Amino acid sequence: MENILNIKPHHFIDIITRYGEGTISEKPHPYGHALHLVSARILDNRRIILRIEPGADDICTPCLHNIDGKCNDTIDTSNRPQAPPSKNAWNLLIDRRWCERLEIGAGDIMSAQELCARIRDKAGNITDIYREIPEGLTRERERKLNDGIRKYLYE
């Protein structure tokens, strides 16, 4: 990884959400992705520079499911039957919605703190971003995201 982190919008949001619920893992995942390493860098340095990357980002790069820049994994659609079973298709869909909401695009560069503040200011009700997921689950995700934003920006 270089000094700039390449990151999918939903990966950053997932990190902040997990930070809000207190479930950041410091251990490597069996898939070999770099979530634990990227999370640590983002949480240790709010001024770290991020480049928005809707494709394979620095979390995805070492993952065993990253095949030529695309995720070949599948998702469990039992709690989101309208979602595509392809994790790559799901990620692209969610990231497109987040990019529209946050008014960002591929290649945009900002600090982690700036992106978090943008999420605070623009996220609003996220049930339409995750419309394939039952509203109650998304409301809980939104609560944890907001907790993470508060912790990240103000503590």
Image (cartoon, grey):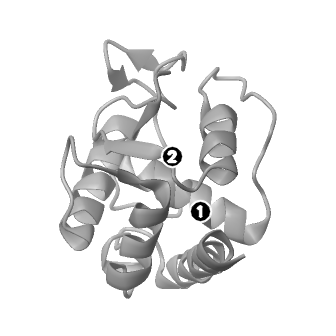
Residue at 36% in and 68% down: 132
Residue at 64% in and 44% down: 39
Q: Residues within 10 Å of mark 1 (few under 14, many from 20)?
A: many
Residue at 68% in and 75% down: 151
| Sequence-wise first label, 1 or 2 | 1
Q: Nearer the viewer, mark 1 or mark 2?
A: 2
- Dot 1 corresponds to which residue? 16
Is label 2 in a helix, a strand or a loop? loop
Percent across and percent down for residue 75 are: 49, 43
Q: Is 23 drawn above or below residue 136 in the view shown? A: above
Most foreground residue, 46 or 37 = 46
Left or right placement of residue 28 versus residue 61 in this view = right
Percent across and percent down for residue 135 are: 47, 83
Residues at marks 1 and 2, CA–CA distance in whole angstroms: 14 Å
Percent across and percent down for residue 82 are: 33, 62
Percent across and percent down for residue 3 are: 47, 29
- Dot 2 corresponds to which residue? 48
Check disc 1 and give the amino acid type. Ile
Left or right placement of residue 125 versus residue 149 in this view = left
Would residue 83 be seen by someone viewing this image from the given angle?
yes
Is label 1 in a helix, a strand or a loop? helix
Residue at 18% in and 52% down: 105
Can you tell which quarter of the image residue 66 is in?
top left
Check disc 2 and give the amino acid type. Ile
